[in-house]
Amino acid sequence: MKKDKPGCDLQTCMLCRLCLKEWTPAIDTHRKQLSFKKGAMLFREGDPVTGIYFVYSGSVKVHKHWGNDKELIVRFAQKGDIVGHRGMGREMVYPISATALEPVTVCYVDLTFFQTSLQVNHGFLYELMLFYAQELQESEMNMRNLAHMSVKGRIARALLQLQDKFGINANGALQLQLTRQDLAGYTGATYETVFRVMSEFVKEGLITVTAKEIAVTNVSGLLRLVKEAEL
């Protein structure tokens, strides 16, 4: 982790966008800009909560232990997203870990200032409550899918979700460097199963895989697999 000179535009993350304009100088005073190399952990599952992170550039995976030496990826975060908020509660420990998927820059605010911001900025508090509710709904949906949806359907759904969230690059591929291991952790499957299903998708013309890039080439085909798996 490296501490940088603040370079944030004070407009990107939800804290800056949703707080009162009069609160911006306070944010500017209390924030710290931190840089992480690819593979570095922003925080680890079980660590005491010290503050909240807002992604300014790069992408982050939020994950937790699952069985022996396995991980379940809860979500992916990108520019503007909040990370570390799941640790707020009675125990005040991070129930998940966060790892940089590429070089990442974040704005960090300590817990005391973040809690004060919630008390002062009611609009931000309201939007954060809605965000928590949305995350809960998505978590419940993912739990249902793990129990009832086929792996093929889960992988198809994940690829469509990630394309919708991160967009595509100049090559038409996902704007996210996603390994098969990460896709396995995100869909609750094994690496071997993901490798097999991805190979099937390539043969069926649903996706293309080049080096570390994955491109969706048949959206309707993947949507069909998702709908079939939901029946």
Image (cartoon, rainbow, N blue to C red):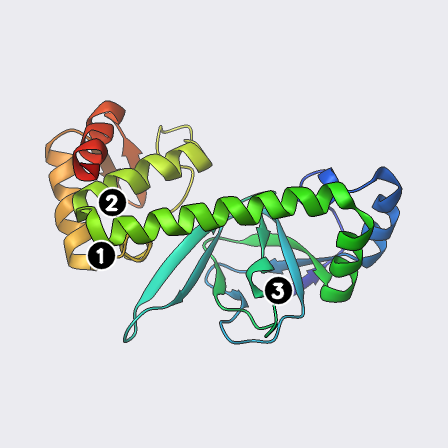
Dot in front, 3 or 1: 3
- The reply to whether the C-beta atoms of the residues labelled 3 and 2 are less than 8 Å apart is no
Neighbour tally class for label 2: few under 14, some 14-19, many 20 plus, Cα within 10 Å? many
| 176 relative to 228, above or below | below
Q: Earlier in the sequence, mark 3 or mark 2?
A: 3
Q: Earlier in the sequence, mark 1 or mark 2?
A: 2
The residue nearer to you, when weighing 53 against 35, is: 53
Q: Which mark is residue 72?
A: none
Neighbour tally class for label 1: few under 14, some 14-19, many 20 plus, Cα within 10 Å? many
The residue nearer to you, when weighing 176 against 65, is: 65
Callout 1: helix, strand or loop? loop
Kindly indicate the quadrant of the structure image that contains residue 101.
Answer: bottom left
Q: Is residue 135 left or right of residue 87?
A: left
Please name the residue that numbered disc 2 is placed on. 154
Kindly indicate the quadrant of the structure image that contains residue 189.
Answer: bottom left
Residue type highlighted by circle 2: Arg
| 214 relative to 55, above or below | above
Give x and y (percent) for residue 11. 73, 38
Q: Is residue 78 left or right of residue 202?
A: right
Please name the residue that numbered disc 1 is placed on. 189
Please name the residue that numbered disc 3 is placed on. 88
Residue type highlighted by circle 1: Ala
Q: Which residue lies at the image location 79% right of the left edge and 46% below the top edge?
A: 121
Quadrant where the C terminus lies? top left
The residue nearer to you, when weighing 124 against 107, is: 124
Q: CA distance from mark 3 to mark 1?
A: 29 Å
| 105 relative to 216, above or below | below
Q: Which residue lies at the image location 56% right of the left edge and 53% below the top edge?
A: 104
Q: CA distance from mark 1 to mark 2?
A: 9 Å
Residue type highlighted by circle 3: Met
